[in-house]
Amino acid sequence: MNQDRKKIFIFDTTLRDGEQSPGASLNPQEKLEVARQLEKLNVDVIEAGFPAASRGEIEAIQMISKKVRKPVICGLSRMIRKDIDACRQALKFAKNKRLHVFLATSMIHREYKLRKDKSELVQIVKKEMEYARRFFDQIEFSPEDASRTEWEFLAEVVGIAIEAGATSINIPDTVGYALPSEFGDMIQFLVRQLPELGNAVTLSVHCHNDLGLAVANSLAAVANGANQVECTVNGIGERAGNASLEEIVMAIDTRKDSLPVRTDIELSEIIKTSRLVSRLTGMVVQPNKSIVGRNAFSHESGIHQDGVLKKRETYEIIDPHRIGLEESQLILGKHSGRHAFRERLKKLGVVLSEKELERAFERFKKLADQKKYVFDEDIQAIVEDEVVRIPTTWALEHFSVNIETQRPPRALMRLKKGGKVFEVSSSGDGPVDACYKAIEKIAKVKAKLSQYSLNAVTGGKDALGEVSVKLKFKDQEIAGRGASTDIIEASVKAYLQALNRALAYGNKRRREALV
Ligand code: KIV
Ligand code: ZN
């Protein structure tokens, strides 16, 4: 059924306009990594850069063209020979290629930037389109600052570009000045003047976010006939950025009832793409950013948490799994209620009686008043303090690790349980893995290490290292912490703490089941 809807082409410009964000520049290898991920995201067009900028930019686009074969690869160019020739070079290996030429058309750009009148601009469009047509089948033309251009003149220039062979027309709101209703009206006006737009000729929009309206303007254009949207991952780009890809795509997907269109984006790749772009560009995603922000699927208020636990859709319009997130998060803090607290205990494998739960909940509330976030480790500490005393079932007696080049490391582990000493040796992929395997051999358990982190607690060469682990014993995920100046010893202590906790919680659960 989705296929019956009109397709909106997603033209991704993260590697061109996005890379124009101050401080966001990428090296060729990083550009390729992003392009490969954009291919997995299934964007239709990748604007890979501005070839005239440098030799390195040309080489990066050539590398992308050789390795990324599914989407159209596009290069940006001013309407001058030198730029068009740079695009020819950059795109010579591309399977599907597009030239994107632009020329400013608004009065302020004509008078102050270009110092050319309307007729001179028309001549440039005719001449350079003719040149470009010799080398490219797909040519996109952008009248820069279109939203501040006189509508009649805009339609005239666009008509001339189409006559000269443009296969796509892109209408930019270059300075993010437009309002959704007027931008939608402008698109409707152009479609009325030139009915091939959005049909034989692709009608694209490219909106900037100076007033925070880039996505709204793009959607208004779609509602009025545009069939391509230019956007960037995480909304990065010049100044306040471009329309955000993930917001456009998820608005179209979520509001199918109101927008009879579709995109072919692979939704489950959205989070991965967002994180990759953020990591490589160094542009941190604001926590409350729609769709991909850290808080976009986190619930803090007790009323909301209770609602989500009863039925997710009460406070979530998107299933987080669809965009590649594991699940929504209930942040435990001072606004959380009993329902969320009990659920978290359940996830941690802790079953308490009503009385114990009440005591633990009161302690949790007190802690939440003092701390911004209450982590799983804090909850485990409360439970251990208030309810379950954690016996040291397995205690570390001694360990050593033999590391030789060319051979996997081998750990010798001696643990004590109820006065008896057990000793085994085991090899592993690294010293920590070898120790963990030896512990599992002695204790006859099997756990999946779902998290491991190492932090220096103090400074200097003799810094105390603190290791935090999360181990999954069947359906229980248990945290453990250990500190030592020797990081392998800290790792062993963290594992043993988690193991002893798992055994204590397990016993308690069995006890509960008996009463
Ligand atoms: O914002 C803009 O006008 C542009 C054009 C080059 C399309 O980025
Ligand atoms: Zn732009």
Image (tube, rainbow, N blue to C red):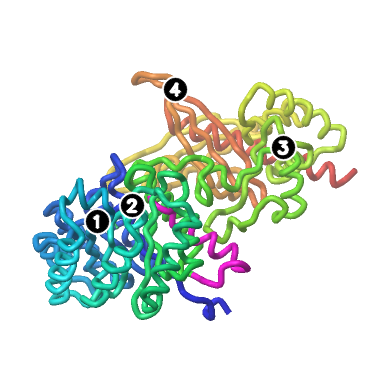
The kind of residue on which mark 1 rests is Ala
Q: Is residue 351 above or below residue 87?
A: above
Magenta part of the protein: which range? 242-262
Separation (CA) of disc 2 from disc 4 = 53 Å
* Marks 3, 1: nearer the viewer: 1
Separation (CA) of disc 2 from disc 3 = 62 Å
Query: Which picture quadrant has residue 155?
Result: bottom left
Q: Residue at x 9, y 63 (%)?
A: 81
- 116 left or right, relative to 191: left
Q: Which mark is residue 173?
A: none
Q: On the image, numbered disc 1 is attached to which residue?
A: 104
Q: Secondary structure at mark 2?
A: loop
Q: Which mark is residue 174?
A: 2
Q: Determine crowd level at label 3: few under 14, some 14-19, many 20+ residues with C-alpha closer than 10 A.
A: many
Separation (CA) of disc 3 from disc 1 = 71 Å
Question: Of marks 1 and 4, which one's residue comes earlier in the chain?
Answer: 1
- On the image, the x and y values in percent for residue 244 come to 44, 53
Q: On the image, numbered disc 4 is attached to which residue?
A: 464
Q: Secondary structure at mark 1?
A: strand
Q: Residue at x 52, y 79 (%)?
A: 3
The answer as to whether callout 2 falls within 8 Å of ligand 1 is: yes
Query: Which picture quadrant has residue 14?
Result: bottom left
* Marks 1, 2: nearer the viewer: 1
Question: Of marks 4 and 3, which one's residue comes earlier in the chain?
Answer: 4
Give the position of the N terminus as an image quadrant: bottom right
Q: On the image, numbered disc 3 is attached to which residue?
A: 504
Separation (CA) of disc 1 from disc 4 = 60 Å
Question: Of marks 3 and 1, which one's residue comes earlier in the chain?
Answer: 1
- 66 left or right, relative to 377: left
- On the image, the x and y values in percent for residue 170 come to 33, 64
Q: Secondary structure at mark 4?
A: loop
Question: Of marks 2 and 4, which one's residue comes earlier in the chain?
Answer: 2
